[in-house]
Structures are given as structure tokens and as C-alpha cells.
Image (spheres, rainbow, N blue to C red):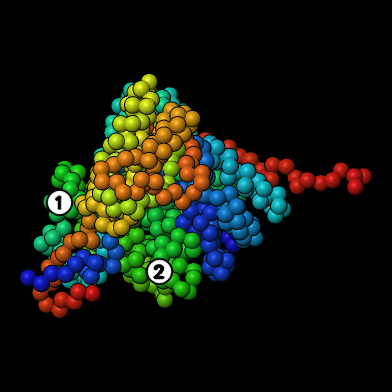
């Protein structure tokens, strides 16, 4: 199976706070075909994200597929609330790195990685 | 006012809303703003706040935006609005939107009014909530936690130095109905400042709030996105159009649709004070060269809830910044940090473990992600270190940070070759006061029966005093 790194398949990969207790990860795919494949085969799932972040599955929300933007959103429990002593990223804007390691299968025909 | 959106007469067919900037003080190009004014907006609005910068600003009563930058933005908005005869609406004054923040912004507006010769009938709407109100709600089982958030306790409420609630559109609508030239609100639900005038005129709540949701971030929903450029929203009875005002940017159906992902846990269902926005049936289509038309946004009413925010003082922080370039030191780092912590505990035996927090952050390893870092190893040839002490007084934090810093500088670790010192300090002095440390104590939902009752309007005329005039005969 041909795969490509997420960095080649997405226009946006980001993280941000959704309130102080939750992180929200967004991936906006570059093509409708790639998005539909990820959505159909649930290539991004709670289990996949939990593994990437070393979290229990219970700390990862069910992915939300958002057709109008070719996007998938996944919410995580923050290890520490934003701003608590010892916390590392007040805005939660640099927590997307592990997602970038993901490699995904390409759609079968007309598959352009970029 | 040009008559289409006045408080009297026929209801307008459309309302044009000029969003100046994503957060008051983030700025906007004059050319974009002028282009927006040329479209004869019925209201100029900006959200001034966010909880994103963390609990400090609420707890300490300080703004996370700069005073001169806020004055610059507000001065342009107020002078333009008076020229057009339309209101200005600002929410989450001073960033965190508690009493000191609101007073800070009111004083800035006062200065502007005096300097520019403006007379502003001003509605000031505090968003502070008394502790007793929250305690009563807690006892009445009217407080709910947010996902992954803790249950609220009475101790959390009592420990809060400040408590605010995000007010909805209702008090803003009242202020506009009564003819405010300027509305300054404390902590507010971001879309409310944009939705208030449309709601006064009976426009659809779903469309008005969804439009507000986009406008509250100004041109962030355009391509290229920007939090410091203007956006125009045009609301009609069955749809709205958003468009950036800089020719450098445009909105696309994807950029506008994608915006509802931003900072939200669910792009289809966006909860607010009196219900939630349901965007499952939205359609996004291009309009003109740079605009996007949106239809299908629905507001689904629900029992009225207010989002409460409170912060508590945790202590005081002192930090020391250093780098390390020695490969043996970097290899032994965990043992060194453990050794330093032991020496600190040993040197100050009267302090108990709960009296302070001593942290060593390692940039180049897991400084950004902490426990979420999948590869907590040093990959490069150097690391950045932040030695941090948090204690109940600044003096104690100073003592602990200084002792940890000097101990780490001269710590004798296994295999050490560089016996003159372990750390590269970029600064002298090497230690910095980071001041008071606050943590979120309350971030919960509170059910209320009457949304307007919590937020009475205080009316004031600005400037409060006439510009200083020399008494007759003075020279």
C-alpha cells in the first residue's frame, strides 16, 4: 500500500486550547479524496491518536469529521490545565507534533500526495 | 446613522458589521478600516479578550494587551463611529473582563473622548459575579463541569480572587436599544458583541451568532488569515456574507467553514449562553471576488447557562534561564536534576514538600510537551534550561531558585570534565521575578433563570470631565 506522511497530505495540522482542560487537534486535508478516504476507513481514530500521544484511549475524544472543511478534529485531555504550575504550553499551540509522524494510505486513483 | 438600522422606523433589510481586529489592541491597517467605513457599517465592534493567555490576567486584574495599542485601535473606532453616527460595541474589556479590566478600558475611552472632543453616551456592563451567587448555585445543583474539568467545590469558589461570567447578547441589546454610542462590556461571549445589533432588529439568532463567531476573529477566517486586519459582515434575513477588506486577502468557502473548528471542541455544535449553534446544515458559497455567503446556521435554544471563570493565587515565581552545551552534562541531566532537588530539600529542612515547587524545564527535550512528548530525549548538541521555583512568597521563591541555580552550576556529576561550571547564563542577573502565579479555580457552567438580571447596565457620559480649560485670567 502506498502511504505518504501527513505533512504532504494536509494544508493545516494544528493544536489549540478548547478551554483550559482540553486540547483540540485539527487536520485539514488538501484534497477531498484524501479526506474521504480517512473518513471512510477511520484512519484517524481514538486509538491512533492515543498511541501517538502515549495517552489512555479514555483521554482522547471520538474524532469529528467536518465535511465542509475536509477536516478532522480530535480532542484530548490536557495532562495539566492551562497555566497550572509545571504546565508547558499555555495556549496549547505546540501540541500537534506527534500527529506529523502519521503516515496515511493514499486514495487509489488520481492520488496526488500534494 | 443612515436610517437603515436606527432604533426607530422600518426594520433594516441588512445590517453591516465592521470587525476591526481580532482582539482590541492587536491593530488593523488604516486602509482596511477606511475601506470598511466606506461600506457604511451600522456598528463597529471588537472582542477585547480571551481566556487563552491563561489565568494570571483575570486573577491579577491586568490586561494582556498593551494600553497604547488598545488606545490606538479604540481611538480610530470611536472617531469613525461618531462620524458615521453608529455605535461601537466592545466585549471582554481589558482581556479578562473583570472590574479592574473594565475600568481600565473605560478610562482609555474617557481619555479618547476628551482628546478627540467626542461625547459618548456609554453603557458599562460589568460581568463580575459575587462569590455568594456561585456558592448558592453550587448548593442548588446549578453548576456543571466542562469536559475533562473538575467538579466545582465551595473551596474553589472562596479561593477565587475574581469571578466573571461570560455575558450573552441580552444586556448588549438592551444597551443599544437605549441608544448607547459606546458599549463597554466585561467578560462576554465573543460573538455577542457582533450579534447584538442584529438581534435588536429581529434578525435570525443562528445567523447573527454564527456571523459573530466568524467576525470575533476578524480576518483570521480569510486567506491569508490575520488577527490584525478588518472583516466586514453583511447580515440579511436568510443568509450572511463575510469579506475581508484588504485586497491582499479573500474568504473561501473552506476558510470560512474551517473557522468554526478553531479553538472549539465541535465544529457542528457550538454552545453559547442560551443554547447552541447548530451548523450541520450550513452551506458556504463564494460571493463576489473576496466574500463567502453562508446559509443554514441555526440557533437551538436551551436552558440559559453562563460560563464562569475564576482564578486563584497559587504563589510567586522566580526563574533562572541557562543553557548547557557539555555532552556529559546533558547525558547525566536527569541525575543532576534529581541531585539538585535533594540538595535544596536538604539545605532547607524546615520547608515541607508542599511549601514550594521546584522545576527544571529542559528545552531541546520535552520543554514544549512535557508528559505528552513521545520522544523525550535530547537530540541536539545543547539544551535550554529554565530553573523555576514557585513558593508562597516572592522572597522564598528567590531563595529556592537561587540555591537551585548555584547548586546546578557547580554540581559534580559522574564523568565531569568541565569543572569550572555547568551552565551558560545569558544574563546577569541570572534570576528573574515572574511575580504572582494564578491558576484557574473556576471554569464551569452556571444555570440562570434571567440572563439580563446578572448584568445591570451602568450609564455614563464620556468624557467624564470636560477637557482641561485654563481658568480665566490664568496665563
Subunit of label 2? B
Residue B250, picture quadrant: bottom left
Residue drawn where x is 53% and y is 36% of the image: B99
Q: Are marks 1 and 2 in contact (CB under 8 Å)?
A: no
Q: Residue furthest bottom?
A: A110
Residue drawn where x is 47% and y is 41% of the image: B431
| Tag in front: 1 or 2 | 1
**Alpha carbons under labels 1 and 2: distance apart:** 33 Å
Residue drawn where x is 20% and y is 61% of the image: A101
Q: Which residue is mark 1?
A: A51
Q: Which mark is residue B445?
A: none
Whether residue B156 is visible here, answered yes or no, is no
Q: Which residue is mark 2?
A: B224
Foreground of the two, B77 or A48: A48
Residue B445 in picture, x, y percent from top left: 34, 36
Circle 2 Cα neighbour tier, 10 Å, few/some/many (<14 / 14–19 / ≥20) = few
Whether residue B465 is visible here, answered yes or no, is yes
Helix, strand or loop under label 1: helix
Foreground of the two, B10 or B326: B326
Q: Residue furthest left?
A: A1
Residue B165 versus residue A45 in the image, above or below: above
Residue drawn where x is 45% and y is 44% of the image: B188
Residue B141, picture quadrant: top left
Residue A20 in picture, x, y percent from top left: 34, 42
Q: Are marks 1 and 2 on the same chain?
A: no
Subunit of label 1? A
Helix, strand or loop under label 2: loop
Foreground of the two, B327 or B270: B327
Q: Quadrant of the N terminus of chain B?
A: bottom right
Q: Residue furthest right?
A: B473
Residue B288 versus residue B233 in the image, above or below: below
Residue A32 in picture, x, y percent from top left: 21, 70
Amino acid at each position: 500500500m502506498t502511504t505518504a506522511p501527513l505533512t504532504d497530505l494536509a494544508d493545516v495540522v494544528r493544536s489549540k486550547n478548547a478551554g483550559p482542560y482540553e486540547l483540540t487537534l485539527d487536520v485539514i486535508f488538501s484534497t477531498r479524496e484524501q479526506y474521504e478516504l480517512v473518513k471512510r476507513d477511520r484512519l484517524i481514530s481514538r486509538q491512533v491518536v492515543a498511541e501517538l500521544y502515549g495517552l489512555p484511549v479514555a483521554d482522547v475524544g471520538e474524532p469529528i469529521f467536518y465535511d465542509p472543511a475536509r477536516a478532522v478534529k480530535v480532542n484530548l485531555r490536557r495532562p495539566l490545565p492551562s497555566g497550572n504550575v509545571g504546565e508547558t504550553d499555555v495556549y496549547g499551540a505546540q501540541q500537534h507534533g506527534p500527529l506529523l509522524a502519521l503516515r496515511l494510505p493514499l486514495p487509489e486513483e488520481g492520488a496526488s500526495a500534494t | 446613522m443612515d436610517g437603515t438600522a436606527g432604533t426607530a422606523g422600518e426594520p433594516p433589510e441588512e445590517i453591516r458589521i465592521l470587525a476591526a481586529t481580532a482582539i482590541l489592541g492587536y491593530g488593523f491597517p488604516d486602509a482596511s478600516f477606511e475601506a470598511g467605513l466606506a461600506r457604511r457599517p451600522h456598528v463597529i465592534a471588537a472582542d477585547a479578550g480571551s481566556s487563552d493567555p491563561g489565568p494570571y490576567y483575570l486573577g491579577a486584574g491586568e490586561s494582556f494587551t498593551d494600553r497604547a495599542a488598545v488606545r490606538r485601535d479604540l481611538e480610530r473606532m470611536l472617531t469613525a463611529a461618531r462620524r458615521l453616527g453608529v455605535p461601537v460595541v466592545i466585549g471582554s474589556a481589558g482581556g479578562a473582563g473583570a472590574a479592574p479590566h473594565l475600568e481600565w478600558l473605560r478610562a482609555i475611552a474617557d481619555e479618547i473622548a476628551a482628546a478627540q472632543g467626542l461625547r459618548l453616551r456609554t453603557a458599562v456592563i460589568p460581568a463580575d459575579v459575587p462569590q455568594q451567587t456561585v456558592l448558592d448555585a453550587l448548593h442548588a445543583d446549578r453548576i456543571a463541569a466542562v469536559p475533562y474539568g473538575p467538579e466545582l467545590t465551595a473551596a474553589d469558589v472562596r479561593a477565587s480572587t475574581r469571578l466573571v461570567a461570560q455575558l450573552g447578547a441580552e444586556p448588549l441589546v438592551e444597551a443599544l436599544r437605549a441608544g448607547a454610542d459606546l458599549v463597554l462590556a466585561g467578560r462576554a461571549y465573543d460573538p455577542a458583541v457582533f450579534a447584538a445589533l442584529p438581534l435588536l432588529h429581529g434578525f435570525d439568532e443562528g445567523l447573527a451568532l454564527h456571523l459573530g463567531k466568524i467576525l470575533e476573529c476578524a480576518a483570521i477566517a480569510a486567506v491569508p488569515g490575520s488577527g490584525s486586519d478588518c472583516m466586514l459582515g453583511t447580515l440579511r434575513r436568510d443568509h450572511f456574507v463575510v469579506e475581508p477588506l484588504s485586497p491582499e486577502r479573500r474568504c473561501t468557502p473552506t476558510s470560512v467553514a474551517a473557522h468554526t473548528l478553531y479553538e472549539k471542541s465541535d465544529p457542528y455544535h457550538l454552545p453559547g449562553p442560551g443554547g447552541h449553534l447548530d451548523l450541520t446544515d450550513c452551506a458556504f458559497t463564494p460571493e463576489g471576488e473576496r466574500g463567502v455567503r453562508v446559509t443554514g446556521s441555526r440557533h437551538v435554544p436551551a436552558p440559559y447557562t453562563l460560563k464562569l471563570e475564576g482564578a486563584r493565587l497559587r504563589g510567586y515565581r522566580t526563574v533562572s534561564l541557562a543553557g548547557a552545551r557539555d555532552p556529559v552534562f546533558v547525558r547525566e541531566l536527569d541525575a543532576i536534576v534529581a541531585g539538585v532537588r535533594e540538595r535544596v530539600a536538604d539545605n532547607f529542612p524546615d520547608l515541607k514538600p508542599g511549601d514550594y515547587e521546584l522545576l527544571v524545564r529542559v528545552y531541546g527535550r520535552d520543554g514544549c510537551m512535557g508528559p505528552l512528548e513521545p520522544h523525550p530525549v535530547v537530540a541536539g548538541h545543547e539544551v535550554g534550561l529554565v530553573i523555576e521555583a514557585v513558593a508562597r512568597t516572592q522572597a522564598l521563591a528567590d531563595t529556592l531558585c537561587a540555591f537551585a541555580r548555584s547548586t546546578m552550576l557547580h554540581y559534580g556529576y559522574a564523568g565531569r570534565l568541565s569543572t569550572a561550571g555547568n551552565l551558560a547564563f545569558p544574563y546577569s542577573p541570572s534570576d528573574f521575578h515572574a511575580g504572582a502565579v494564578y491558576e484557574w479555580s473556576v471554569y464551569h457552567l452556571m444555570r440562570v433563570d434571567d440572563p439580563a438580571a446578572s448584568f445591570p447596565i451602568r450609564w455614563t457620559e464620556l468624557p467624564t470631565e470636560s477637557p482641561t480649560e485654563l481658568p480665566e485670567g490664568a496665563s
